[in-house]
Amino acid sequence: MAKVYQLPLDPTLDNDIVKRLDQLPRARKAEWVRTAIRIYMSIEKGDNVPIVPASVPQSPMRTEKPRRNPKDVEFE
């Protein structure tokens, strides 16, 4: 089972973080926070950290195509 941490944020001091997290889909928030923490830990260790563009295009959400009913398929 995954360990869950609560992250209290001050609406005034952390306004930029709150706004950014509110822009993310719920399923991506934890991933984004984990990545940010790992980047910060790498900086602390003195590792080379890749420069990430400020605007990274999000991968499209997977949408299923409507399935055809086998009865609707015609063969020639």
Image (cartoon, helix red, strand yellow):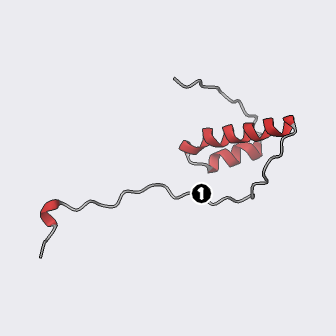
| Number of numbered discs overlaid on the protein picture | 1
Residue drawn at x 52%, y 58% as measured from the top left: 60
Q: Residue furthest bottom?
A: 76
| Residue 13 visible in the picture | no
Res. 40 image quadrant: top right
Q: Position of residue 59 (x, y in %)?
A: 55, 57
Apparent side of residue 34 relative to residue 41 in the rendered image (left or right): left
Q: Position of residue 71 (x, y in %)?
A: 12, 62
Q: Secondary structure at mark 1?
A: loop
| Residue 41 visible in the picture | yes
Res. 18 image quadrant: top right
Residue drawn at x 73%, y 41% as measured from the top left: 36
Res. 10 image quadrant: top right
The one of 13 and 2 positioned closer to us in this rendering = 2
Q: Position of residue 13 (x, y in %)?
A: 81, 39
When the figure is inspected, residue 22 is found, relative to residue 75, above or below; the finding is above
Q: Amino acid at mark 1?
A: Gln
When the figure is inspected, residue 3 is found, relative to residue 67, above or below; the finding is above
Apparent side of residue 45 relative to residue 10 in the rendered image (left or right): right
Q: Position of residue 74 (x, y in %)?
A: 13, 71
Instruction: Indicate the quadrant containing the C terminus: top left, top right, bottom left or bottom right.
Output: bottom left
Residue drawn at x 76%, y 47% as measured from the top left: 16
When the figure is inspected, residue 6 is found, relative to residue 48, above or below; the finding is above
Q: Which residue is mark 1?
A: 58
The one of 45 and 67 positioned closer to us in this rendering = 45
Mark 1 neighbour class, 10 Å CA radius: few under 14, some 14 to 19, many 20 or more: few
Residue drawn at x 63%, y 60% as measured from the top left: 57
